[in-house]
Amino acid sequence: MSSLVATAIIVTAFFTAFLSGMFGMAGGLVLMGVLTAFLPLGQAMVTHGILQITANGWRAFLLRRYIKWKIAGFFLAGTLGAIALLFLIPVHPNKASVFLTLGILPLLVWVPRRWVHLDASRPFHAILCGFLAAGFSVAAGISSTLMDIFFVRTTLTRHEIVATKAIGQIIGHGVKVIYWSWAIIQAIGVGALPPLWLFALALPLSFGGTWVGKQVLGKMTDKGFVKIVRVLITLIGVFYIFRGVSLLMA
């Protein structure tokens, strides 16, 4: 890994942790796109997962009193179902499919509420959210935008959404790291895993970005929070769709 690539990843880790700390989403989406552009897909998945587990873990700690543990428990139950399915049907995406998925998923937040009645505060919906989030984490690297359609329709406050989603993302990214680490080791060897020094440099900045994002979150309103999130992730999604299409046509 060149010093230029490492620097880009480290800087992106701070910026995307800031976005996630502020919105509970978007940061992981941006980070996955940057990593996929610079690294082999397997390395991008593992690097993204470890950075996101750390950022989400710190965010969950900072907002721990807002976590809805009942929702997190049902989410975990759904994740276990996804793990069982992955043993039966392994996934093998390429970069084009990853970028297209990264681009399409954010657009789901614009689906009218009357069309899809999904609410993470309902047990079955939380289980379904966990199942789908774990699957998309492995196949596309991200799950936060998929989780959004389950959370933007709840009556939770912005702090409760960010805190509870952080727990869900820790679970989903954990599945992804294990799945792709094993795939890399089986195909190439342990030496092909992302270097530890990269995380030693990036993780402190990830902590810092999360803390700064939390400060900004406290100054927003619940109504303004939802509006900004929808516009932000839509713009990111459109960019990734163009990127995915360009890879297919290359």
Image (cartoon, grey):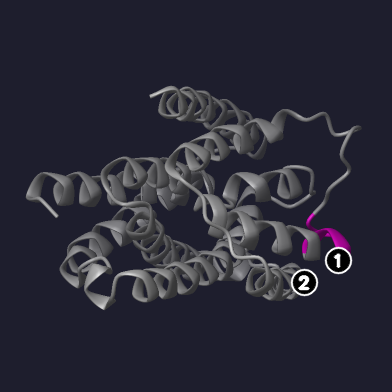
| Pick the front one: 26 or 239 | 239
Image coords of residue 199 (percent x, y)? 24, 66
Q: Nearer the viewer, residue 110 or 58?
A: 110
Query: Which residue occupies 61% across, 35% down?
Result: 106
Q: Which of marks 1 and 2 is nearer the N terminus?
A: 2
Q: Which disc is residue 88 wearing? A: none
Say which residue appears at 25% left-offset and 65% top-offset: 194
Identify which amino acid the numbered label 1 is placed on. Pro
Residue density around tag 2, few if under 14, some if 14–19, many if 20 or more, within 10 Å: many
Instruction: Answer few, some or many: residues within 10 Å of disc 1's Cα (few below 14, many 20 plus, some between 14 and 19).
Output: some
Q: Quadrant of the N terminus?
A: bottom left
**Residue at which label 2 appears:** 74
Q: Where is residue 201 in the image (x, y as percent from the top left)?
A: 17, 63
Q: Which residue is drawn at 46% across and 46% down?
A: 94
SS of the residue under disc 1: helix
Circle on res. 123: 1
Residue 196: percent from the left, percent from the top? 21, 72
Q: Does the magenta stretch include residue 179?
A: no
Which secondary structure, mark 2? helix
Residue type, label 2: Phe
Whether residue 10 is situated above or below residue 100 in the rendered picture: below
Q: Alpha carbon of mark 1 to alpha carbon of mark 2: how far? A: 6 Å
Q: In this view, does 182 lie above or below 35?
A: below
Left of 43 or right of it: where is 85?
right
Residue 36: percent from left, percent from top: 36, 45
Magenta region: which residues?
Answer: 120-126
User: Magenta stretch containing residue 124, yes or no?
Assistant: yes
Tell me whether the residue at label 1 lies in contact with that at label 2, contact meaning CB atoms closer than 8 angstroms: yes
For the C terminus, the image quarter is top left
